Amino acid sequence: MGAYSPAALVTPALHARVMREVIEPTLRGLALEGMAYTGFLYAGLMISPDGTPNVLEFNCRLGDPETQPLLMRLQSDLTRLCEAALGGRLDTAAVQWDPRVALGVVMAAAGYPEDARRGDVIEGLERAARLPGKIFHAGTRLESGKVLTNGGRVLCAVGLGAGITAAQRAAYALADSVHWPGLHYRRDIGHRGVRMAQP
């Protein structure tokens, strides 16, 4: 129901271990089976208290809601990166990231996750557009000039900040500026990161 980037939990040592123990063996396995793969490979992981990465799933797409904070931090042209991947030149591409923290809060429809209600008018998007950050649409539709709910995960409010507390504050300011009947979202996104950041 939310995500933030970068995550303090992912140290350079943990990142190297995930690459060594999960990603690189997966890519070698695909190659050994003759499966040429170009695209996004999302590894859903849980990290044990001892630092062991455990794979929950793989997806051939970006993760949701992890993607939205990543896109807020990505300064390189995503289209050019995709073209480089398709052309076999991704190893020559430099990816630039905004050093700030991005935090996203998923805003859900009434009834989500069981039976999400559709067709509620979303109010406040113009107000949110004047605030720092960005609202990403997911389960919405445009009808007669009005934006309506059209799925369970309706919007994702993403804030940027020098630290996780500032990013969290910005994301919740965005989320609080938008309403529709039955809107709900978690109020604790990033709480572990905030605790880790406190001295």
Image (cartoon, rainbow, N blue to C red):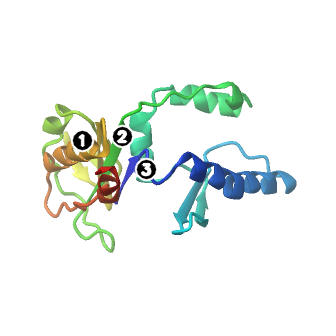
- Residue linked to disc 1: 166
Task: Of the two numbered discs 3 and 1 on the same chain, state the one appearing first in sequence.
Answer: 3
Labels 1 & 2 near each other (Cβ < 8 A): yes
* Above or below, 4 relative to 125: below
Local packing at callout 2 (Cα closer than 10 Å; few below 14, some 14-19, many 20+) is many
Q: Residue at x 23, y 51 (%)?
A: 148
The x, y position of residue 136, in whole percent, is 33, 43
Q: Amino acid at mark 1?
A: Ala
The quadrant in which the N terminus is found is bottom left
The x, y position of residue 164, in whole percent, is 31, 45
Q: Residue furthest bottom?
A: 114
The x, y position of residue 159, in whole percent, is 28, 41
Local packing at callout 1 (Cα closer than 10 Å; few below 14, some 14-19, many 20+) is some
- Residue linked to disc 3: 8
Task: Of the two numbered discs 3 and 2 on the same chain, state the one appearing first in sequence.
Answer: 3
CA–CA distance between discs 1 and 2? 8 Å
Q: Is residue 134 left or right of residue 72?
A: left
Does the image show residue 150? no
Q: Secondary structure at mark 1?
A: helix
Where, by quadrant of the figure, is residue 95 drawn? top right
Q: Residue at x 41, y 45 (%)?
A: 5
